[in-house]
Image (spheres, grey):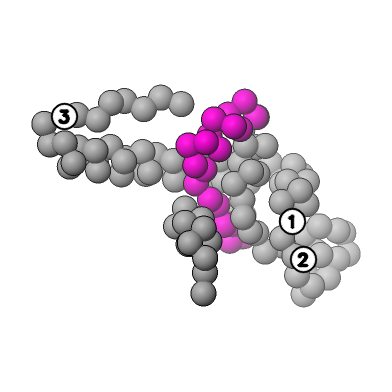
Amino acid sequence: MKTLLERRIAARQRIVEAGGKQVTLRRPTEYEKAKYYRLPPVEYLCQFVDDCPLTEADLFDGGNAETPVPFDRALFADWLAENPELWKPLVDALSELNAQHEAARAEALKNSNPGLSAPACQD
């Protein structure tokens, strides 16, 4: 059974397709947005990738395509640095997760205070 923390984290995760890979992204918390906001976009993105099934063939010339590699965020970041075609779709997907969350928060605020409009959120 998942802990409450594991359930909260899982609720922020989405699997997105990019370059033939199923990448698990996690929407950052408000604190994480503040903590990492100065990072370049790809480095920021890597903070919120929780899984990406890679094989030895993805990592090494002549590597075995049948040998999965356990997920490691630093290894993923190093691999991603060599695959710039994935940067934009993954950054866009993370941005979309944030936008959906902000829209849901604004809607919840509006519904809890029907006479008030939600303030504009700025990052």
Query: From the viewer's perspective, is residue 42 above or below residue 120?
Result: below
Mark 3 surroundings within 10 Å by alpha-carbon count, few (fewer than 14), some (14 through 19), many (20 or more): few
The residue tagged with tag 1: helix, strand or loop?
loop
Q: Label 1 belongs to which residue?
A: 72
Q: Label 2 belongs to which residue?
A: 69
Residue type at mark 3: give it: Leu
In this orientation, does residue 119 appear? yes
Residue beneath the point at 16% across and 36% down:
113
Q: Which residues are magenta?
A: 21-40
Distance in Å between CA atoms under marks 3 and 2: 50 Å
Label pair 1/3, CB-CB below 8 angstroms: no
Say which label, 1 or 3, has the lower sequence index: 1
Query: From the viewer's perspective, is residue 10 above or below residue 94?
Result: below
Distance in Å between CA atoms under marks 1 and 3: 45 Å
The label nearer to you, 3 versus 2, is 3
Residue beneath the point at 48% across and 62% down:
4
Q: Which mark is residue 107?
A: none
The residue tagged with tag 3: helix, strand or loop?
loop
The label nearer to you, 1 versus 2, is 1
Q: Label 3 belongs to which residue?
A: 116
The label nearer to you, 1 versus 3, is 3
Distance in Å between CA atoms under marks 1 and 2: 9 Å
Residue type at mark 2: give it: Val
Residue beneath the point at 18% across and 41% down:
112
Q: Position of residue 96 (x, y in %)?
A: 44, 43
Label pair 1/2, CB-CB below 8 angstroms: yes
Q: Position of residue 79 (x, y in %)?
A: 76, 49
Residue 116 versus residue 52: which sits nearer the camera? Answer: 116
The residue tagged with tag 2: helix, strand or loop?
strand
Query: From the viewer's perspective, is residue 18 above or below residue 95?
Result: below
Determine if the magenta segment contains residue 34: yes
Please indicate whether residue 25 sits to the left or right of residue 79 in the image: left
